[in-house]
Image: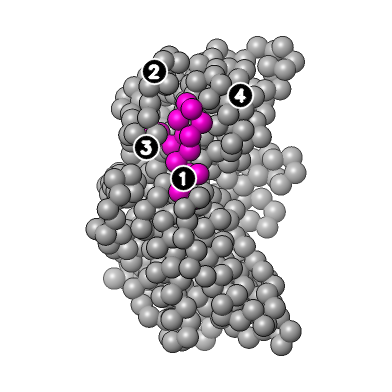
Amino acid sequence: MKRLPEPPEDVVVNLLRLANTRIPDDIGWALEAAAGWETGEIARIQLGAVLENIKKAEHLGVPMCQDTGIPVFYVRGKFDSSIVSAIAAGVEKATRIIPLRPNTVDPITRENYGSNLGPGMPVIHFVPGDVPYTEITVLPKGAGSENMTRLAMLNPADGVEGIKKFVQGAVLDAGGRPCPPSVVGVGIGGTSDRCAAMAKEALLIPLDCDNPDPVLGKMEEELFSALNSSGLGPMGLGGSSTVLGVRIKKEACHTASLPVAVNIGCWATRRASARIWDDGVEYSQGAVF
Amino acid sequence: MSESDVRSLKLGETVYIFGPVITGRDEMHIRALEYAREGKEVPPDLEGAALFHCGPIMRDNGNGGWSVVAAGPTTSARMNKLEPEMIRRFCIRAVIGKGGMSKETAQAMKETGCVYLAATGGAAVSLAEGLGICKGAEWEDLGMPEAMWRFETDRFGPLIVAIDSQGNSLYEKVSSSLVRVF
Ligand code: SF4
């Protein structure tokens, strides 16, 4: 449903509110499914607490997790440079009024900027496109999961087996730290920087759609069942729901390289998008990349 | 919480806390230990505390008071280097967090009588409800996430005894039996 036009700054505030207070449908369904198949008592308590928390956050209109993260933005379609200051203003305002936790600090002095801004913030990725709208997507990324990010420049000879082994290691070594059951974003190929970016973009792909590439789709399935039979379980306390889904993206790479990146999204994999048309704004939580 | 209360808790058991809880993350640990080593005064709440690894979202009530909006656990492993000394110096009785802690920390828990309680990661709204009334903060200059917030809790949980006062760890049990398919 299209809403009346709003200034881009307010669209950003609405996006941050939506993403932080309401879980995307696909993630919510996956959590409910996991609660259905879990048998361990401790695991069931964890999933029950997560589901109850999601309901309360939506009902009260408050962030579902205290770590409202670093908001990572993706701007696609039609835009000009004014979008940068509009997004920054929206982040500052959202931090004050929702409220979000002020998370950005100087990396050396550790002094908090208080606004979720600071040099290089907010992080914005741009993809220009020939469409009559601007699409802004936000992915608030908490540190518990972001700190578990892994990048490997594998040997081409390591192949698919090497990739699967690396992804499995990244998820299992992370243990309970990224608040499993998690969503596993994987980037394969590209350059080292593109590969890391792809792994995060993979978290924007809903869990309830098939990978258009059957080879990647098969890897997603194999990793999903392997990780869920690992025994790690919710919060690393044991159980059969370690991941809610695995999403893989690939791009071309150098003939001598096989870059692989893993970006873990916690159970609170949050996202929201808005399409800004000339005559109104449309919101959704099912970003596709 | 007394030592004998804590010693009676069994691995894997579910518990709730009724009573005082303080929050503390990296910066609070660093300052508490720095002050204690230099013989400077530290907040009395630290003694025998239930210490929650958490950087909450707090709302200023406008009348000098604060209320808690969202308060889930942060990753405890970041405090591994500092926690054993915290536990020994201040006789911390319970550390509450997510993801578990090191063998060294478990050893300090065993010696002094302390447990590690796992809170559900990200269950920040439910846990904030259980934290109840905020009794103010110490060291607010550290910033909202890093300050030491004081709460009088009312049914704070569910919490799982994930390291008991004998140093046994549920995380170790799980990680030592992980199945690696690839
Ligand atoms: S990992 Fe996710 S759910 Fe867990 S504390 Fe961080 S942001 Fe919240």
Residue B147 appears in view:
no
Q: Chain of mark 2?
A: B
Rounded to the nearest angstrom, the CA distance separating label 3 from label 1 is 11 Å
Q: Nearer the viewer, mark 3 or mark 1?
A: 1
What amino acid type should be assigned to the residue bearing mark 2? Asp
User: Which residue has dot 3 on it?
Assistant: B12
Assign a secondary structure to mark 4.
helix
User: Which residue has dot 4 on it?
Assistant: B86
**Quadrant that contains the N terminus of chain A:** bottom left
Q: Nearer the viewer, mark 2 or mark 1?
A: 1
Q: Position of residue B43 (x, y in %)?
A: 57, 15
Q: Indicate if the residue with disc 3 has its beta carbon within 8 Å of ligand 1.
A: no
Q: Which residue lies at the image location 64% right of the left edge and 40% below the top edge?
A: A112
Q: Along the line of sight, which residue is nearer the eye, B110 or B14?
A: B110
Rounded to the nearest angstrom, the CA distance separating label 3 from label 2 is 16 Å
Label for residue B173?
1
Count residues near mark 3 (Cα–Cα under 10 Å), then give few for <14, some for 14-19, many for 20+: some
Q: Along the line of sight, which residue is nearer the eye, A248 or A108?
A: A248
Rounded to the nearest angstrom, the CA distance separating label 3 from label 4 is 24 Å
| Residues flagged by tags 2 and 1 on a common chain | yes
Q: Indicate if the residue with disc 2 has its beta carbon within 8 Å of ligand 1.
A: no
Is B152 magenta? The answer is no
